[in-house]
Amino acid sequence: QVQVVESGGGLVQPGGSLRLSCAASGSIFSIVAMGWYRQAPGKQRELVAGIRSGGSANYSDSVKGRFTISRDNGKNTVYLQMSSLKPEDTAVYFCKARIWIPRGGDYDYWGQGTQVTVSS
C-alpha cells in the first residue's frame, strides 16, 4: 500500500509565502511523477504544478512565476513553494503521486489535502 501525506498549509496574508510538502511512502517501486492540485469551494479540482522523475516541471498559467515545484527523489517528497499569494489561491491543496507498478502499470495515489487560506 502507498500513503501520500501533505503538510504546510495554513493562513497567510496576501503577498505572503507558504511552502507545502508532500511525502509518499509504502510499497513504492518507482514514482513516475508527482503533482499538486487544488480545489476551491464550488469549483473543480485543477492542476497547479507537476514534476516528473527526470525533473521536468509544468505549471498552470495562474501560478507561473509565483509558485515553484521541486522534488527530492531520495525522500519521495515534493515541495511547492508559493510566493506572492493572492486571495484567489485559497483552496484545499492535494498532492498526487503517480507510481509505476511492475506488470501493473501506473497508479495514482492522492493525499488527504491541506487547506491554504490567503486573507488579511
Image: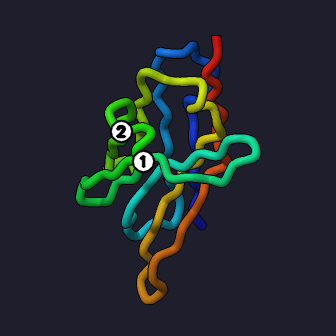
- Relative to 87, does residue 63 appear above or below in the rendering? below
Q: How is the image coloured?
A: rainbow
Residue 23: x %, y % from top left: 49, 47
- Residue visible at 33% across and 52% down in the picture: 58
Residue type at the position of mark 1? Ser
Vertical position of residue 95 compared to residue 30: above or below: above
**Which corner quadrant of the image does residue 110 belong to?**
bottom right
Relative horizontal placement of residue 108, taking residue 52 as reference (left or right): right
User: Which circle marks residue 60 in the picture?
Assistant: 1
Judge by depth and name the residue closer to the eye, 93 or 44: 44
Three-letter code, disc 2: Lys
**Label 1's element?**
loop
Q: Which residue is mark 2?
A: 64
Give the alpha-carbon distance from disc 2 to disc 1, as whole Å.
Answer: 6 Å
| Residue displayed at 49% across by 34% down | 20
Q: Residues within 10 Å of mark 2 (few under 14, many from 20)?
A: few
Left or right: 92 as drawn, with respect to 8: right
